[in-house]
Amino acid sequence: MSDNQTVPTVEAGQERPLTPDIIKEHLYPIQDPEIGASLVGLGLIYDIRLLPEGKVEIDMTLTSPACPFGPEIRANVHTTAAKIPGVKDVYVNLIFNPPWNPKEMADEDTRMLLGIF
């Protein structure tokens, strides 16, 4: 899939290109069940790649390699991304390098929510 493929937006009659940012918008509501904050805001989504034929690869991590909710979180990311118009196939890679660090990887709003200044 090229970066200039157009897919319908939520607003009827308008189209915009499918981009990693649009995929992140769709993933933003998914929360880490232990922390109660967005995976995107926490910085757990490392990379999103658009590949030919509607394939999407998402690199993500967990707050800990031993996170008991890992399979559930990964499944939620996969299911949500697969529902985006124009996405035909999704692969979610769990990676742990670099290790997640909320002080460096979480966005400002999420750091404030977590009390990290």
Image: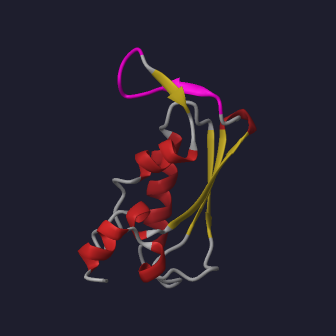
In the figure, 44 relative to 4: above or below?
Answer: below
* Residue 6 drawn in magenta: yes
Residue 58 is left or right of residue 111, and the answer is right
**Residue drawn at (49%, 85%), measured in percent from left and top?**
66
Q: Nearer the viewer, residue 4 or 45?
A: 4
**Magenta region: which residues?**
4-13
Residue farthest along the top direction in this orientation:
13
What is the x, y in percent for residue 101? 48, 82
Q: Nearer the viewer, residue 42 or 77?
A: 42
Q: How is the image coloured?
A: secondary structure
**Residue drawn at (72%, 33%), measured in percent from left and top?**
53
Q: Nearer the viewer, residue 43 or 58?
A: 43
**The C terminus - image quarter:** bottom left
In the figure, 60 relative to 52: above or below?
Answer: below
In the figure, 65 relative to 4: above or below?
Answer: below
**The N terminus - image quarter:** top right
* Residue 3 drawn in magenta: no
In the figure, 18 relative to 14: above or below?
Answer: below
What is the x, y in percent for residue 113? 24, 73
Residue farthest along the right direction in this orientation:
52
What is the x, y in percent for residue 100? 51, 80
Q: Provide the major secondary structure of the magenta segment.
A: loop
Residue 63 is left or right of residue 117, and the answer is right
Residue 10 is left or right of residue 1, and the answer is left
Disc count in the image?
A: 0
**Residue drawn at (35%, 23%), measured in percent from left and top?**
11
